[in-house]
Image: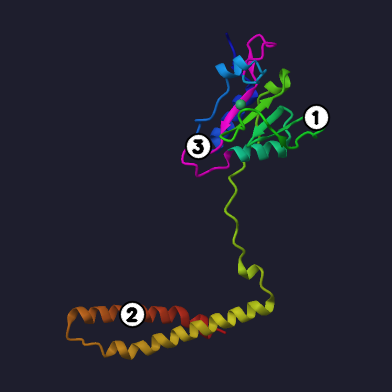
Amino acid sequence: MTYRLAHSLVDLRAEVDAAYPGRDKASDGWIGNAEHASRGNGSDHNPDRSHPLGIVRALDLDKDDRDGSRANIAQTVVDAMLRTKDPRVKYVIWRGRMFSSYVSRGVPAWTWRPYNGVNGHFEHVHVSVNPGSTGDRPGPWRISTPLAPAPATPDPEDTMTDEQFKAHLAAMREGFTSVVEEVRNLRPVLNTINTTNDGTRVAARSIHSALEKVVGLITPSAAGR
Ligand SMILES: [Zn+2]
């Protein structure tokens, strides 16, 4: 028996591999296994005999990384398909739900509906492509959207009113001024350190010069206002 995976799905898999190097492939799959075949359920994982080569028009893609750290790989693929509405897509099954590119039992195209099959597809996303040349067509899927970034913490200064910002600056200025004051007060203390011990003297000197640098850094910004 000869068969091959649809060109479209070869490209999909390559695109996901490129976007997520090192992704888990344990739940990947494409050729119908014995269970699929014996059920005779017309799974797209079984070679399509209307094509001389026998084209397999379904691909399973594992949901995440080997360590589970990037848990949304399958979700990203699904989201992309809902966004691009690629004409090659026939239907997609993921986490107990499915959508198809056509109206099915009154449910509009590209709209989730419950999937009640034996395997709820919680470990992998199942993508079936259309029959004929449409579903077989190679080409990019535009799924390589970066993983969702961590939710951005709003920059407080973006949300400040002018008045709040002025108060913020005043508080900073006050803070700098008090730091400078404390450093100045430390100078005489350092001068009283017992200088008969060489190690203590060296330490006192380096603390002193570090403090001088701090004063030098802070003073212009504190005095410039
Ligand atoms: Zn499948």
Tell me: 188 left or right of 30: left
Which residues fall within the magenta stretch?
46-73
Q: Residue at x 53, y 85 (%)?
A: 174
Quarter containing ligand 1? Answer: top right
The answer to which of 41 and 132 lies nearer the viewer is: 41
Residue corresponding to mark 1: 105
Total labels: the figure holds 3
Q: Residue at x 21, y 87 (%)?
A: 194
Asked if the residues shown at circle 2 and circle 3 are in contact, with their CB atoms under 8 angstroms apart, the answer is: no
Residue corresponding to mark 2: 209
Mark 2 vs 3, N-terminal side: 3
The residue tagged with tag 2: helix, strand or loop?
Answer: helix
Query: How far is the residue under mark 3 from the one under mark 1?
Result: 39 Å
User: Three-letter amino acid code at disc 3?
Assistant: Pro
User: Three-letter amino acid code at disc 2?
Assistant: Ser
User: Three-letter amino acid code at disc 1?
Assistant: Arg
